[in-house]
Image (cartoon, rainbow, N blue to C red):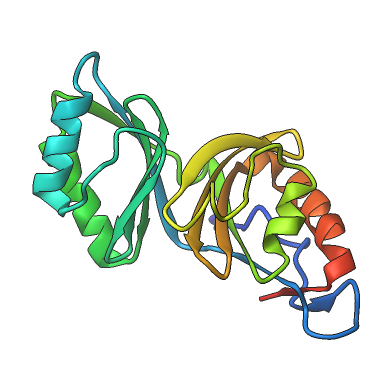
Amino acid sequence: MSEISLKARSPFAGLSTPGRHGAREGTPGVSLSERVGLGLFVISAGAGKANDVAAKVLSATGLDLSPGPGRASKDGFALIGTGPGQWLAVAEGKAALASLAKLATALKGVATIVDQSDGKAVLRVSGPRARDTLAKGCSLDLHPRVFKAGSATTTPVALIDCVIWQVDETPTYDLAVPTSYAGSFWSWLTASAAEYGYAVE
């Protein structure tokens, strides 16, 4: 009997076609790309252990966690506050995964860590019209005085629950969405970006 070989498939496979789309005049206002190869993990502090988690994170990784929503990052490893005592850990590359492994050891007894790498997909939305694109389906105030680089939160975008964080002032945003809603989210996002012209990388 022949062996069945399974290969990981992007939740956006067959949806994203590289190149320029939408309005053709001028430079595309939005750039879209999938962030592949990320490790995504939910860290949840035990009851009354949030301060202990913050102390152990600082000792193990050098990252200083803010008490509220926000993003702390270093060398490809980021922790994004998603709620009281809860963070989404994003690891990119071997060094970042090593940091996560070190942190997991340090957090034994004070927090749980659940792998969400296959449960969430991350899209990067960047460019001068990225804010306008997201604002069409997001009630969050994305004005740079309110939401800027380092800001993060959980919020519905196009009625789909997302974790969103701002990477830089371009502006560039990363959005983690449930893989089961990837097709619906992509359809909404590309329709919203079409009037500005968008490039898929």
Q: Where is residue 93 in the image (x, y as percent from the top left)?
A: 33, 66
Residue 137, compared with residue 112, is above or below; it is: below
Residue drawn 36% across and 24% down?
84
Front residue of this view, candidates 4 and 153: 153
Specify the farthest residue to the top.
47
Front residue of this view, candidates 42 and 159: 159
Residue 57, compared with residue 13, is above or below; it is: above
Residue 96, compared with residue 162, is above or below; it is: below
Residue drawn 62% across and 49% down?
142
**Res. 6 in view:** no
Report the quarter where the C terminus lies.
bottom right
Residue 175, compared with residue 84, is above or below; it is: below
Front residue of this view, candidates 38 and 188: 188
**Res. 187 in view:** yes
Q: As drawn, is 192 to the left or to the right of 164? A: right
Q: How many marks?
A: 0
Specify the farthest residue to the front.
145
Residue drawn 16% across and 34% down?
107
Q: Where is residue 88 in the image (x, y as percent from the top left)?
A: 40, 41
Q: Position of residue 145 (x, y in %)?
A: 54, 52
Residue drawn 87% across and 65% down?
194
Q: As drawn, is 15 to the left or to the right of 34? A: right
Q: Where is residue 200 in the image (x, y as percent from the top left)?
A: 72, 73
Q: As drawn, is 43 to the left or to the right of 160? A: left
Q: As drawn, is 22 to the left or to the right of 35? A: right
